[in-house]
Each structure stands twice: as C-alpha cells, then as structure tokens.
Image (cartoon, rainbow, N blue to C red):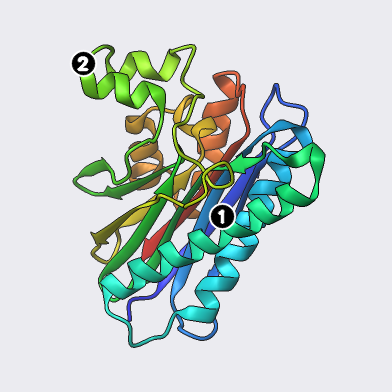
Amino acid sequence: MNQMQLWGMTDIGLVRRENQDAYAMRQLERSGRAAGVVCDGMGGAAGGQLASQIAVSVYMEELDRLLTAEMEPRQVRDVSAQAAAAANRAIREEAARREECRNMGTTLVSAVSYDGGVAVTNVGDSRAYLITEDGITRITKDHSLVESMVDRGDITAEEARRHPSRNLITRALGPDISADCDGFLCPMKPGDYVLLCSDGLVNTVTDQEMLFEVIHGDGPDTCLDRLLAIARRQGAPDNVTAVLMRME
C-alpha cells in the first residue's frame, strides 16, 4: 500500500473567542491505512467545540476498529460512511443528555488511504481538494445554501465566498437523524496531495493560492503555516483548520 505523509494545523483566527474546529490525522494501527479528518462545529460556544471533538474522536476510533488492510476501495469508502454515522449517533446522544448542547452539530470531511488513492467522505461545507502538478480540483460539494444558489446560477462561485449567508449549511452531523454523507474515490499518484480544510480557510485563501503554496512553495512541512498566514492577512474571521496528505 502507498505510504502517506501527514501534516495538520488549527488556529482560532483573529475574531472568534473559541476554536470550534477539530482535526486528527494518523496511520491506523490495525489496517496500516492513513486517515485525516477535519470538523467545524456549530451550536454555541460549548456545543460546537464539543460536537467537533466528539466527531473527530469517534470517527477515528471506528475507522481503526472496522478497517482492514485487505479491503477494496469501495469497502474503505463504505466503512468511512459507517464511522461518520457512528459519530453522528454519539453527538446526538450527548446533545440529548445536555440541555446547553441540544442544538450542537458539526461538519466532517475526511480522507482514508487505499492502494492508489483515498476515499473521501463529507457532510457540510468543509472541503477536500486534490492538488497535483497539473492543478487543483475540489473533490467535495458543499452542503450549503450558497452552493445551491451557485448550482442554480443565481450567484457565481466567487460571490459565494463573500455572501452573507455563506455559513448556512443544509446538512451536518448532530441535527440530522441520519448522517447523509457524500463519498468519493479519488485516485492519486506519488507526489499528489489531498487537502482537507474548514471554511475558515476556504473563505480567506483562494484555490490558486492553495495550489501555489502546496506545489511551488517552500516545501510541505511549512505549507499549512503559510496558508494560515494568508488567511490571517485576510482577517481570519473564522477558525482555520487543515490537514494535508501526500502520497509517497
């Protein structure tokens, strides 16, 4: 199986009082697969932070429990969806126990390696991008009000980045009984990257800036620091979180 290099970072940004994003990345022990996940919580100070932390923790635990080294790519994708569903149940159970957290929820975007690519899962508006020498491609589709407006032709993708309703999402873990996630199989070559990120990065750093820093910047070890610096120069009104995965 192809090896993956992993980097991650999260930052509170310049405006928010707490960081409601969470992330994790690691080589899974049982299967030897690499996995990364980014979650962006919502539902008040206590709720959003708790929801994203629960989602990250339960999702990674379930991956480690269910995945094996022998699984085909489609099976990896299906297990990732099962892990997201387990995270959804855990958030809902905790919300039912705690009055102050009853409206909490979170986005989730993840990537799990298979031989020759990654299985990507997403719900909400955190994103996954494939970045190669040939360019940058968004893998995921936002579950958001503005994405629906872009699809209908009401606004452009550039207008969506600044739209006052850009934070309104139509699917999330927590509020929805079933975790209605999208799943993708994304082939990769050695030297290709997958970038997972919250909307705090997407709304302050352009796709072309992401492409430049990942492929042409001063190396992947400091790439996420450079992307964060761009976000902060743009005011960083939201938490900024990203995981970068490179196929070896």
Number of numbered discs visible in the structure rendering: 2
**Res 17 quadrant in image:** top right
Earlier sequence position, callout 2 versus callout 1: 1
Query: Where in the figure is residue 36, as x and y percent of width and height?
Result: 49, 60
Report crowding for label 2: few under 14, some 14 to 19, many 20 or more residues within 10 A (C-alpha).
few
Lateral position of residue 5 relative to residue 15, left or right: left
| Residue at x 57% of width, y 31% of height | 229
**Can residue 27 be seen in this snapshot?**
no
Q: Name the residue located 35 percent from the left edge and 55 percent from the top edge.
A: 193
Q: In this rendering, which labeled residue sits more in front, label 2 or label 1?
A: 1
Q: Label 1 amino acid?
A: Asn
Judge by depth and name the residue closer to the eye, 71 or 6. Answer: 71
Residue 35 can be seen in this image? yes
Report the residue marked by disc 1: 88
In the picture of the structure, the residue carrying the numbered disc 2 is 153
Does 100 appear above or below 96? above
